[in-house]
Amino acid sequence: MRSLVRQRVELVTAFRITKCLVFLLLFCTTSLPNAVFAQSSAPNLGPSKRHGAGDIDIYVMGADGGPIEVPATVSLLAATGPVLRQGTTLGGAIEFRRVAVGAYTIQVVAPGYERVAKEFRPFDAGTSTIIIDMRPALNGKTGAGSSQMLLAPKVQKELGKALEALRMNKPEQARSHLEAAYGKAPNHPAVNYLYGVYFLQVKDQEKAKSCWAKALEFDPKYVSALLALSEALIREQKLTEAETYITRAVEADPNSWRAHAILADVLLKAHLPEKAISEADHALKLGHGQAAIVEPLLARALAEGGNKERAVRVLEEYVRDHPHDVAASKQLESLQAPDVPILPAKKAALAEVKPTTATEPAISLPLPSNWLPPDVDEKVPPVDPGVPCALDEVVQKAGERVEEFIKNVDRFAASESLRHESVNKWGFAESPETRRFDYEVSIEEYRPGRFDVSEYRGNKYSPAQFPDGVETRGLPSMALIFHPNNIGSFALSCEGLGQWNGTPAWQVHFRQRPDKPNTIRSYRIGENGPSYPVALRGRAWIAAYSYQIVRMETDLVNTLPEIRLFVDHTVVEYGPVRFKNRDVEMWLPQSADVYCDWRGKRMHRRHSLSDYMLFSVDEKQQISEPQAEASRPNKELNP
């Protein structure tokens, strides 16, 4: 044992000598990029005069007892969770200087190794040595890009600024922020992926591909990089390579409709129309309305597979809903024209050097937002593939629960806590504000299927009391989508049996039908101004045993440029409240998160409701708090 300890001490000593030599070389070679320095250049935590400060030397060992050969990302986390320091090892070593005395966690992530998190107990001022032993990952795929890898706050900010600049197609503004982020986290897949997007925007596809390939070195399952590489290879007519990457993307995220759409395009170009049809159908099922643009590709695959009749039906429906898609209209005319031969797949593949024109807008990757949750149609949350879903029964019973609520309750009151954050142009929340209201809601069905939902906030409430003078209304109305007299206005599909908070729940997707009245959501400018109906699409989680709606998430069907409404993403979670003197349990909103981009103002709000008072149609009485085992606590949560 003593000899083993002596060997490790000697190894650490050798590390220190090597590190000094490397530092001298780097110091003398000013032409090298800053990214090669192993020491974190994050802002100094500051020595505490009261408690002192010290240095931490961290040595990352492989399975053979020597330093790992690949770069590892090392993060120093405070006991409360935030990343305080972060850097990349050089020769298996890294040093954090002048760290205040305290308790920390050291997290190490490296390609091909399992993630390690090691608690670091309080230490005295001076130098402390930490040895981290890494274990090879069983599947060989755990890497620095795993979802567990964190970014230091300043790196997150630089990456967010780069992301917003790229979203606005301003690569010249993004470059300096990408350089800063890369200097701090060169092995993070998101940094390399966005660098690839930058190079794509400046028309350097080779460098873009190189960045995406590097992102995959650190996270082989980084879906955005897999999809981007697939599209690039399609443009170069390298279909075999493109199929390899897109197949990996489908395996990494089977619920990504974009992955299935790109795979369908590759298969069609490879003269496999039947397989292309299957993938296109699956993409449409997963992506709902957002994936409708895949229908021209499906029609082409159907026509080349010999099913011209269905191809015409698919295109007719698509053109009816997308009258401005000129390419699809011409495709339909070609199919309907008599005695016009279908272009053979080989000739079509040779004629095109990029993704199929009709589907290019669909499979072009949207850059993620650093302040918005993913769109509800971007992918389907996981469901149990072996459980069939009876959509009509689920919707009917959920509607019965909504009817029970309307019959038993005409008014409820609650204490409302509001946390508001404005979102700046870089996508970062700032200037948080809080408000508290005495909140009251009354619901009246003034004619079948038409409800008057009135919301009142006490404390001499006026719209000006809301931050930015913009009030939030309509949250109690969302569940009314499933009222039997309203549900016919929505196109529905059951995605399967998923889970919410550990409870089985049916996932039902809904989308406002364009041929039906929209009575759920509207925007109004000014108290007496015009009202603008807002069409919604979204997903509801309906408890499998009680058929109560436990969660709803919505997005806009279309933006409303006339009132500058570009984002309205809402998430509402429900919980039970019970009458004290009657065996009646009602499910009411417990919390709601609202993300909005309206009239140049971007905001995130979290509404939390507690201390309910429920008033029934025939009596008024106070209710108890929701049962602890059946709902979440009604307290404000930081987003």
Image (cartoon, rainbow, N blue to C red):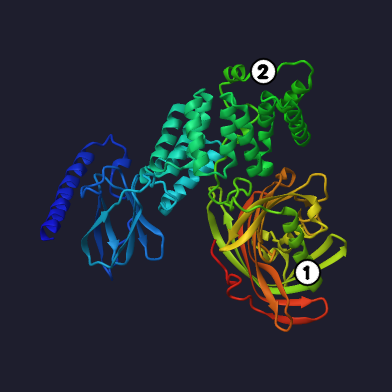
* Residue underneath mark 2: 343
Q: Position of residue 397 (x, y in %)?
A: 75, 62
Q: Image quarter for residue 306? A: top right
Which secondary structure lies at badge 2?
loop
Label 2 and label 1: CA atoms lie apart by: 58 Å
36 left or right, relative to 177: left
The kind of secondary structure element at disc 1 is helix
Q: Is residue 460 above or below residue 251?
A: below
Name the kind of residue labelled 2 in the image. Leu
| Residue count near mark 2 (Cα–Cα under 10 Å), binned few <14, some 14–19, many ≥20 | few
Residue 579, given in percent of the width and then of the height, sits at: 71, 79
Amino acid at circle 1: Glu
Q: Is residue 235 above or below residue 455?
A: above
* Observer-nearest of 547 and 574: 547
Q: Is residue 295 visible?
A: yes
Horizontal arrangement in the rendering, residue 628 relative to residue 477 (left or right): left
For residue 404, the mark is 1
Dot 2 or dot 1: first in sequence order is 2
